[in-house]
Image (cartoon, rainbow, N blue to C red):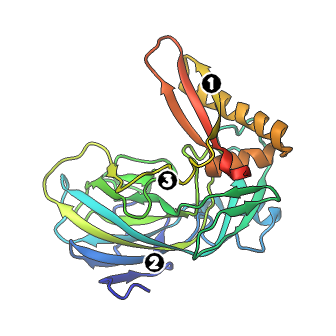
Amino acid sequence: MCQACHYTIHAAQHHFGWDNQIPPVAHVTPGSRVHLACQDASAGQLRATSGLDDLIAMDPTKANPVTGPLYIEGAEPGDILKVTLEDFTPSGFGWTANIPGFGLLADQFPNPALHIWSYDAKGLTPALFGPHAKVPLKPFAGTVGNAPAEPGCHSVIPPRRIGGNLDIRDLAKGSELFLPVEVAGALFSIGDTHAAQGDGEVCGTAIESPMNVTLRLDLIKQSPLAMPRFRTTGPVTNHLDTKGYEVTTGVGPDLMAGARDAVAGMIDLLCAEHGLAAIDAYLLASVCGDLRISEIVDAPNWVVSFYFPRCVFE
């Protein structure tokens, strides 16, 4: 519990999807520090003892719960909500899954798969993945956003102008996120907390993990913002840079096809060099490998690269 926080919002105070008619769970004043308990992306349907049957039986309508919404006093359309992510308190439990029909290579991996993680919640030492791999941890919130002006209930899965399921791993401790406000009070929510994720979250899931978040909410009046932006307070990649990277590429006129080729190439490489099953390489790539656009100016072909940190196996 955050003793210095002005508000505490419990995990039971959550919702599914974005809807500006959902009643706020609290009214908060700008400048307030808030402590929020966030569920994992399965809304508790997966636990430390879960197996493949539990994944198959999951109710997809209960995916990605977000804690909130919070009504920020004085917030109006055209304002900016500044969210300072002050701290994350992880639970030590997480899961990564291949969900049929979801993920960058869904056509290549049609069968469900589940990996349960048990990690060091206090020291955040690298988490074991099988007998040979250790994944560096970096807690963050995958879904952070305000309610949209458009009426009705909207899926939480795709990201939006007002934020939402951004899945940006650098929205971690110390980062400051700036979100457009489209409705009175902003109606801010947060969830989908991760213990680690690679850029791209290529299989569709990260280390999905319930955790508590402490943040500060500030209001910037009448300063219209077209899309979310954020700033970090220090380096964002040095936790994986210590041993260098293995890098595969995709080259061609389509960025999505290039991304698929780059990831598929890395899966082949991990299988060949480390004896992993293809599905395990896919899950591992999702939690610690990074997709990058290396070149997008030399028409007609662009280059997408997939970086896998060598420290995971050393």
Image position, residue 250 (x, y; %): 62, 24
Mark 1 and mark 2 lie on one chain; the one further toward the N terminus is: 2
Rendered image quadrant of residue 67: bottom left
Nearer the observer, 49 or 121: 121
Q: Tell me the distance, in whole angstroms, between the alpha carbons under discs 1 and 2.
A: 43 Å
186 vs 28: above or below: above
- Quick one: label 3 or label 1, which is nearer the N terminus? 3
Image vertical order of residue 111 relative to residue 75, above or below: above
Disc 3 + disc 1, Cβ < 8 Å: no
Mark 1: amino acid: Gly
Task: For marks 3 and 1, give the CA distance.
Answer: 23 Å
Residue that label 1 marks: 250
Amino acid at pointer 3:
Arg
The reply to whether residue 33 is in sight is yes
Determine crowd level at label 2: few under 14, some 14-19, many 20+ residues with C-alpha closer than 10 A.
Answer: some
- Residue behind mark 3: 169
Residues at discs 3 and 2 in contact (Cβ within 8 Å): no
- Amino acid tagged 2: Gln
In the rendered image, residue 270, in percent from the top left (x then y), is placed at 77, 40
- Left or right: 292, with 94 as reference point: left
